[in-house]
Amino acid sequence: MDRVKPATLVDVRNYFADELKVVMEKHRLSALETSTLYLASLLSRHIESHTFFTVGGNGKLADNFLTDLYIQYLQAKPEEQKLVLQRLGDVCLLVSGYFSDSLRRKVVDLSFYFGMGGSAYYNLSVMSDKTETKDTFGELANKFQSFSNVLGEMSERSGLQSNKDVLRLYERWIVTGSERIRSVLNEKGITTAHKSNLKFKQ
């Protein structure tokens, strides 16, 4: 009997690349091929949150983690600053999108991650010498929230497991106004025609 070969990093990256293209096409979000491959590679390397995030004793992302990264950026040499900016942008993108539930924090914090992550990628684009790299990080900066929403939908494909999950998703919709989130909520029986009037369908 033949053994099933374990998935390689390339297999996982190709899977995420295909998923990204499907979700982006669904939401009519265009992107450079290099941007799509960057996101697929990012997801494939950090498919589990514990392989990427610094966590505290309670298992949650440390509150001062982004602050620590920013301090590292201020104190680092120019070449090292690029690495710190990239990590800062990556963390903000994954936290606000694919791993948003890992924070267990108020969704209003999303705007902070959108701003910091987008700024990190923008500065990285400005500091980049190669045109391809400059264009890729420039697009990640300009479409940061859109890419975050795409990663969020990919994560949500695993399903909403509890009322708390639905509530967090509703709170995220209140902040972002995302049509994708509104559609998911409607499928769960929650109308979102008016943000101030939450109703459950009978």
Image (cartoon, helix red, strand yellow):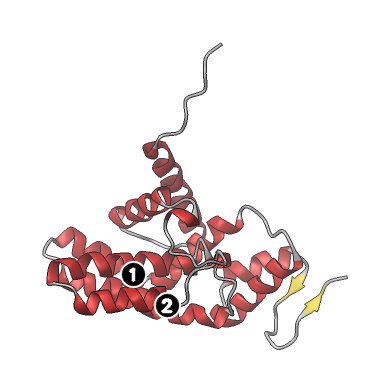
Classed neighbour count for the residue bearing mark 1: other residues with Cα under 10 Å, few (<14), some (14–19), many (≥20): many
Does the image show residue 40?
yes
Classed neighbour count for the residue bearing mark 2: other residues with Cα under 10 Å, few (<14), some (14–19), many (≥20): few
Q: Residue at x 20, y 78 (%)?
A: 75
Q: Residue 64 bears which disc, if any?
A: 2
SS for dot 1: helix
In x, y percent, where is residue 65?
40, 73
Which residue is more in the foreground, 15 or 67?
Answer: 67
Residue 118 left/right relative to 191: left
Query: What residue is shown with label 1?
Result: 88
Q: Residue 191 bears which disc, if any?
A: none
Residue 4 left/right relative to 86: right
SS for dot 2: loop
Report the number of numbered marks. 2
* Residue at the limit of the structure toward the front, as seen here: 57
Q: Amino acid at mark 2?
A: Asn
In x, y percent, where is residue 1?
56, 11
Which residue is more in the foreground, 152 or 177?
Answer: 152
Quadrant occupied by the C terminus: bottom right
Q: Amino acid at mark 1?
A: Leu
